């Protein structure tokens, strides 16, 4: 009785070899997710493929082995689902006697006699890569110790570098919170650095990059992630400018800033205006849905000033009507990895929503209320205004307590 292992050894391996697939073009028995987290520390099934065919760090095809006694297309849909996750266009399913090829882009399939060679398969993806995209894909990730990128992190980095290689100047990556957006941003910067990419004279100098965050904690997290380049990075803030007698720092390659710190404020010109408009080659905007794309948003003026740079937005917010500005500005995302994907793959923990109402979900300020700081700008405050337009410490305390109690 023959097994799948027999099909692999007796038929698929020799057939791939005959089509010039080398060991470095094939990943065998490849698990690429952790399996959904279930109750009692148990995991669901991990996504597994028999063969992943690749060339120049581009996944080209998935090959599924079947027992000789089974139909070659048995379970094809699951293989197609896995190929879709990996952004792979071609699926092969074989019982050794027959091999079926399916093209996800056209939706057509047929039986084939021989596997295509790596070059033939790569050429079917033609038009999607340029020399620069190719060069950037082939620069290895910067990994420390036993660290390995997750499959979607690789795909997100490649999607961004491919877009830069194609000369796109507005790029959006949408990835759920907790999936490692800063790690992805770091790998993109690393590849651009190693290739000496820049907007004016590619190859002649290293790029100058501005990383914009909207909260200190994000900027600090990012600086820690970018630690391998610590000699090349600097933070733009009041303290740094004071140290230099009012001059903004320019002697670095990677600049971190909280947009509030460099934007215009009352009676103060924004620090960003002290930089020439073409100073930066790339501007990375973390949590870019928080106003980067909104005409009135504080970031917009900064982005307009550095208009000639590539603007790469990172956001966790999926497409919704209230996020339409972001999509108008950046266009459709180059890559999306949703919260649902993260949970199903087992990289994020499933959760249940517990709704809690407080007696302060709507607040009308009266003369009895004591305003500690600032002025009231509206008659009635609702849930979405808390911690943005108004801060009520007792309510924050109550919400925090309720979270802990649950």
Image (spheres, rainbow, N blue to C red):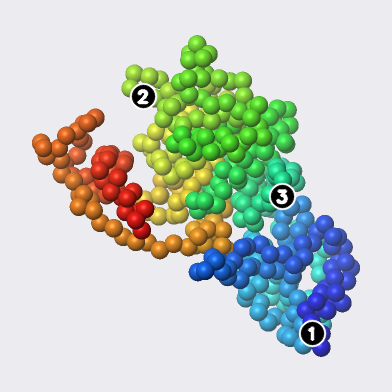
Pointer 3 residue: 146
Q: Give percent across and percent down for residue 308.
A: 55, 31
Residue occupying the point 61% across, 36% down:
226
Figure quadrant of the C terminus: bottom left
User: Secondary structure beneath disc 3?
Assistant: loop
Chain-order first, disc 3 or disc 2: 3
Residue 282 against residue 252 in the figure, above or below: below
Residue occupying the point 58% across, 20% down:
250
Task: Report the side of 205 relative to 36 (left or right).
Answer: right
Residue 39 or residue 270, whichever sits in front: 39
Distance from label 1 to label 2 (Cα)?
72 Å
Residue 65 or residue 240, whichever sits in front: 240
Pointer 1 residue: 68
Of labels 3 and 2, the one closer to you: 3
Residue 255 against residue 183 in the figure, above or below: above
Query: Residue 30's quadrant in the figure?
Result: bottom right
Query: Residue 223's quadrant in the figure?
Result: top right
Pointer 2 residue: 265
How crowded is the residue under tag 3: few (<14 C-alpha within 10 Å), some, or many (20+)?
A: few
Residue 227 against residue 349 in the figure, above or below: above
Residue occupying the point 73% across, 31% down:
203
Residue 54 or residue 128, whichever sits in front: 54
User: Secondary structure beneath disc 1?
Assistant: loop
User: Secondary structure beneath disc 2?
Assistant: loop
How crowded is the residue under tag 2: few (<14 C-alpha within 10 Å), some, or many (20+)?
A: few
Distance from label 3 to label 2 (Cα)?
46 Å
């Amino acid at each position: 009785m023959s097994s799948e292992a027999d099909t692999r050894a007796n038929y698929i391996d020799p057939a791939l070899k005959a089509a010039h697939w080398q060991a470095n073009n094939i990943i065998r028995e490849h698990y690429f997710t952790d399996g959904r987290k279930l109750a009692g520390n148990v995991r669901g099934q991990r996504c597994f493929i028999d063969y992943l065919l690749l060339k120049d760090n581009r996944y080209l095809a998935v090959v599924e082995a079947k027992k000789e006694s089974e139909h070659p297309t048995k379970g094809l849909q699951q293989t197609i689902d896995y190929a879709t996750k990996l952004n792979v266009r071609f699926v092969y399913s074989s019982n050794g006697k027959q091999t079926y090829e399916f093209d996800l882009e056209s939706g057509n399939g047929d039986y084939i006699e021989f596997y295509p060679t790596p070059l033939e398969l790569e050429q079917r993806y033609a038009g999607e890569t340029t020399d620069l995209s190719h060069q950037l894909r082939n620069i290895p990730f910067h990994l420390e110790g036993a660290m390995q990128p997750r499959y979607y992190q690789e795909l997100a980095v490649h999607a961004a570098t491919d877009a830069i290689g194609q000369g796109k100047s507005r790029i959006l990556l949408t990835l759920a919170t907790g999936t490692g957006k800063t790690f992805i941003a770091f790998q993109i910067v690393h590849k651009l650095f190693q290739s000496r990419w820049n907007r004016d004279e590619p190859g002649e100098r290293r790029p100058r990059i501005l990383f914009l965050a909207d909260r200190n904690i994000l900027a600090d997290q990012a600086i820690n992630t970018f630690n391998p380049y610590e000699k090349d990075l600097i933070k733009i803030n009041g303290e740094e400018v004071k140290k230099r007698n009012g001059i903004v720092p320019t002697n670095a390659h990677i600049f971190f800033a909280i947009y509030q710190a460099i934007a215009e404020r009352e009676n103060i010109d924004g620090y960003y205006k002290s930089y020439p408009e073409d100073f930066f080659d790339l501007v990375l905007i973390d949590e870019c849905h928080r106003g980067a794309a909104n005409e009135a948003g504080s970031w917009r003026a900064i982005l307009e000033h550095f208009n000639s740079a590539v603007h790469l937005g990172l956001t966790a917010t999926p497409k919704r009507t209230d996020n339409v500005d972001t999509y108008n500005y950046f266009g459709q995302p180059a890559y999306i990895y949703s919260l649902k994907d993260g949970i199903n793959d087992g990289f994020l923990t499933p959760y249940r929503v517990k709704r809690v109402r407080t007696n302060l979900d709507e607040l009308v300020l009266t003369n009895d209320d004591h305003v500690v700081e600032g002025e009231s700008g509206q008659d009635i405050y609702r849930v979405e205004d808390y911690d943005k337009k108004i801060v009520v410490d007792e309510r924050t305390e109550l919400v925090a307590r309720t979270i802990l109690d649950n």
